[in-house]
């Protein structure tokens, strides 16, 4: 699972394109105005490459891996639940395939 955070500062800033680029990389949840949690099979280099297509000169972003045992914050309960559910997917991919089919 990854955290993606960005600042779109250019005059051509396209928030819809950035949101679509993030969501195109896997299961995504916006947790703050410009911060997303992403559950993806891609690595951080692949995700960053996809996001570069949505930014312009002056825009910035970071993609960093988030570990289940290394996070803390003040978010809505539904957001924590989403992350727990996606943590379970990472731990037990076979179980989830069986349950979804």
Image: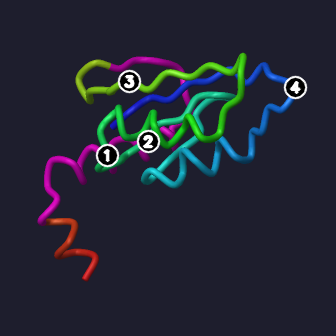
Point out the frontmost of discs 4 and 1.
4
Residue numbers of the magenta segment = 71-94
* Magenta stretch secondary structure, dominant: helix
Q: Residue furthest right?
A: 11
Left or right? Give the position of 14 relative to 51: right
Pointer 3 and pointer 4: residues touching (CB < 8 Å)? no
The image shows residue 81, relative to residue 58, as above or below, that is below
Choose the circle earlier in sequence order: 3 or 4. 4
Q: Where residue 53 sits in the image (x, y, percent)?
A: 60, 41
User: Residue 64 has which mark?
Assistant: 3
Residue sitting at x 33%, y 42%: 84
Pointer 1 and pointer 2: residues touching (CB < 8 Å)? no
The CA span between labels 3 and 2 is 10 Å
Q: Which residue is mark 4?
A: 11
The CA span between labels 3 and 4 is 26 Å
The image shows residue 67, relative to residue 70, as above or below, that is below
Left or right? Give the position of 21 relative to 87: right
Pointer 4 and pointer 1: residues touching (CB < 8 Å)? no
The image shows residue 61, relative to residue 23, as above or below, that is above
Judging depth in this view, the residue of 65 and 31 nearest the camera is: 65
Crowdedness near tag 1: few (<14), some (14–19) or many (≥20) residues, C-alpha within 10 Å: some
Left or right? Give the position of 43 relative to 64: left
Q: Which residue is mark 2?
A: 38
């Amino acid at each position: 699972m990854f955290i993606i955070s960005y600042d779109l500062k250019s005059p051509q800033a396209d928030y819809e394109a950035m949101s679509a680029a993030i969501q195109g990389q896997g299961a995504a949840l916006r947790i703050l105005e410009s911060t997303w949690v992403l559950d993806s099979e891609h690595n951080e280099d692949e995700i960053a490459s996809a996001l570069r297509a949505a930014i312009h000169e002056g825009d910035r972003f970071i993609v960093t891996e988030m570990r289940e045992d290394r996070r803390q914050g003040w978010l809505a309960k539904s957001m924590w639940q989403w992350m727990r559910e996606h943590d379970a997917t990472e731990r037990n991919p076979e179980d989830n395939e069986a349950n979804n089919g």
